[in-house]
Image (cartoon, rainbow, N blue to C red):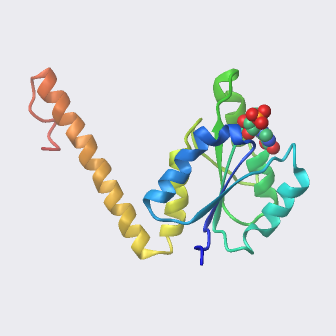
């Protein structure tokens, strides 16, 4: 039997997938089951409302919604679900994603969308993992390991840079 998806990754168009794929990859890394679909507030408003209204009842725990331009999808989903919604501003050809960012981040009080950076789908995936990890000690442990690995990588970068530039052998932390 296929695993129950815990995160819904939706986007305004299949053209958003090259950006949104990073959210799916982050969830893969933590072995979190998810579903993926195209859903548009503008082009398929009725389906979008139905998806949002049914998402929690279907067992999803959060939604990651990416859209470009006049990006109303994340906010509209947030208005019809009780689930946390993470918005990903997708950069398009013009305006460098600033339009998407402003559309997603400037929500009216009462309807929150956790907005990540322009193109920040990987962080959206990681945030969805953290939301689950708050109620799942095993997943929290994996997140701790991931953070430790990040720490090691950053320390290593400093080590390499100091070796390249010379001078001080350490800033007082790291090896
Ligand atoms: N921003 C939205 C919404 C929405 O917010 O409902 N629906 C589609 N779109 C965006 O339109 C862009 C161009 O879409 P096409 O590539 O299909 O023309 C995509 O970035 C999509 O997210």
| Left or right relative to 9: residue 133 | left
| Left or right relative to 118: residue 66 | right
The front one of 47 and 72 is 47
Q: Residue at x 31, y 61 (%)?
A: 145
Please indicate, yes or no, whether residue 110 appears anywhere in the rendered image. no
Specify the quadrant that holds the C terminus: top left
Please indicate, yes or no, whether residue 134 appears anywhere in the rendered image. yes
Q: Residue at x 16, y 35 (%)?
A: 159
Residue 88, located in which quarter of the rendered image? top right
Specify the quadrant that holds the N terminus: bottom right
Query: Residue 115: x percent and y percent?
Result: 63, 46
Q: Residue at x 40, y 74 (%)?
A: 138
- Asked if 39 appears above or below 142 in the picture, the reply is above
Residue 165, located in which quarter of the rendered image? top left
Residue 20, located in which quarter of the rendered image? top right
Q: Residue lying farthest bottom?
A: 1
């Amino acid at each position: 039997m296929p695993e129950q998806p815990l995160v819904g990754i939706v986007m305004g168009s299949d053209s958003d997938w090259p950006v949104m794929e990073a959210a799916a990859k982050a969830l893969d890394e933590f072995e979190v089951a998810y579903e993926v679909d195209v859903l548009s507030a503008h082009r398929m408003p009725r389906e979008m409302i139905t998806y949002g209204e049914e998402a929690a009842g279907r067992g999803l725990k959060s939604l990651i919604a990416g859209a470009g331009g006049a990006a109303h999808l994340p906010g509209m989903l947030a208005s019809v679900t009780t689930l946390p919604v993470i918005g990903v501003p997708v950069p398009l050809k013009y305006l460098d994603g600033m339009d998407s960012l402003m559309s997603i981040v400037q929500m009216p009080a009462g309807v929150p969308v956790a907005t990540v950076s322009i193109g920040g789908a990987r962080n959206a995936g990681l945030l969805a993992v953290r939301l689950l990890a708050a109620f799942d000690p095993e997943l929290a442990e994996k997140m701790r390991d991931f953070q430790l690995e990040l720490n090691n990588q950053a320390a290593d970068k400093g080590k390499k840079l100091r070796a390249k530039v010379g001078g001080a052998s350490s800033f007082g932390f790291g090896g």
